[in-house]
Image (tube, rainbow, N blue to C red):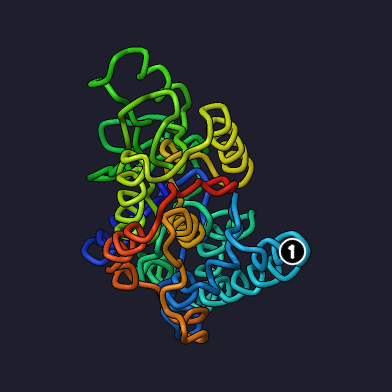
């Protein structure tokens, strides 16, 4: 039961080892295919080009801002093209009408960008083929209850089963170890703690969250975020007022609620917009975000990896030795 990464992985694992698997979910999502026309998905999503095409609450440079404000048809056209490829790859698994009907159950009614800018799930390689073969039987419904031998669905169906795996998410983060006044601030919203730069709260002194800025390239985001936190805590970066930081938090909160599906930790996620996020933090640290220059082709189209950020601490320390004034936070929301 469920349509997240864990549910998909377990359904595929079970289907390869047992006679029959029923996959129950409220609504299907677009899955990130491991291969897109023979190209590994990381070359589409983990390059600067792929991230520039990803809509975000902030664009770190003028070229990106122009593209997203004045040439929106280019962005929408790109994602419509990606959607058509993913749909083609899904449907080519069907060998007969019954298989086509099963796969049709898995076609979302919303646009692919809606899922790709959220915590999109990487589709198991064999999931769609197993659905086409009838080894996974998809059902769009909700759980109504259980009997001793079966699971009951809201569409009236009953599925006899030996084992039910319920994989429907997680709870909103809580902070029982903090004073009550701070818990009220951090636990006020159902989609998680709302933080400035996804790292600090302007009303809670001497507390920082390294690791809550989670995204598709998690380790570099955490390490760059931690470098930013250290600089901030040492007063090496001049931050805006608490009111200005709260205004920035509110802007991102509204953008996420309008553009990203609900998740219990949505407020903490940078997800597939990791490049814009890391770029802004590096710029505030006085470090160039363009890690592959002077090779402009590699900078735009080559896959970014954790190793591209391995020397940021040394760069920061060298630059700091030459500075006479503190750095300033950029007038960008992230």
Say left or right for 278 vs 174: right
Eyeballing the image, is 45 above or below 202?
A: below
Say left or right for 129 vs 243: left
**65 or 136: nearer the viewer:** 65
- At x 58%, y 62%, the residue is 54
**116 or 231: nearer the viewer:** 231
Say left or right for 326 vs 96: left
**Is residue 120 at least partly visible in the picture?**
no
- Coordinates of residue 287 in the picture (x, y in percent): 42, 63
Outermost residue, front direction? 324
Quarter-of-image position of residue 234: top left
**266 or 121: nearer the viewer:** 266
- At x 32%, y 36%, the residue is 208
**Is residue 110 at least partly visible in the picture?**
yes
- Coordinates of residue 59 in the picture (x, y in percent): 60, 58
- Coordinates of residue 156 in the picture (x, y in percent): 50, 36
SS at mark 1? helix
Residue placed under numbered mark 1 in the picture: 72
**330 or 271: nearer the viewer:** 330
Outermost residue, top direction? 180
- At x 44%, y 74%, the residue is 41
Q: How many marks?
A: 1
- Coordinates of residue 174 in the picture (x, y in percent): 32, 26
Eyeballing the image, is 15 above or below 180?
A: below
Eyeballing the image, is 262 above or below 310?
A: above
- At x 29%, y 15%, the residue is 179
Q: Residues within 10 Å of mark 1 (few under 14, many from 20)?
A: some
Specify the quadrant that holds the N terminus. top left
């Amino acid at each position: 039961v469920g349509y997240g990464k864990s549910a998909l992985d377990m359904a595929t694992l079970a289907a390869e080892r047992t006679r029959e698997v029923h996959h129950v979910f409220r609504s299907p999502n677009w899955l990130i295919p491991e291969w897109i026309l023979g190209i590994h998905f990381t070359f589409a999503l983990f390059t600067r080009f792929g991230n520039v095409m990803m809509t975000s609450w902030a664009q770190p440079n003028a070229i990106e801002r122009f593209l997203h404000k004045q040439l929106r048809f280019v962005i929408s056209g790109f994602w419509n093209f990606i959607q058509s490829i993913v749909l083609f790859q899904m449907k080519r698994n069907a060998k007969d009408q019954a298989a086509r009907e099963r796969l049709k159950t898995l076609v979302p009614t919303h646009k692919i960008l809606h899922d790709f800018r959220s915590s999109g799930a990487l589709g198991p390689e064999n999931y769609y083929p197993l659905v086409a073969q009838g080894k996974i039987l998809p059902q769009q419904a909700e759980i109504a209850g259980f009997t001793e031998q079966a699971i009951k669905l809201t569409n009236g169906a009953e599925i006899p089963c030996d084992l039910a795996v319920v994989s429907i998410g997680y709870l909103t983060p809580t902070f029982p170890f903090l004073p009550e006044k701070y818990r009220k601030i951090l636990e006020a919203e159902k989609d998680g703690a709302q933080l400035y730069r996804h790292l600090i709260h302007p009303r809670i002194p001497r507390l920082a969250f390294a690791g809550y800025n989670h995204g598709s390239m998690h380790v570099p985001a955490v390490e760059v975020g931690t470098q930013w936190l250290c600089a901030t805590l040492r007063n090496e970066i001049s931050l805006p007022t608490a009111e200005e930081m709260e205004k920035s938090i509110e802007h991102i909160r509204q953008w996420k609620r309008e553009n990203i599906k609900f998740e219990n930790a949505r407020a903490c996620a940078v997800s597939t917009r990791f490049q814009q996020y890391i770029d802004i933090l590096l710029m505030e640290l006085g470090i160039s975000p363009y890690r592959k220059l002077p090779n402009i082709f590699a900078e735009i189209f080559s896959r970014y990896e954790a190793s591209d950020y391995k020397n940021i601490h040394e760069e920061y320390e060298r630059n700091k030795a030459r500075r006479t004034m503190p750095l300033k936070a950029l007038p960008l929301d992230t």
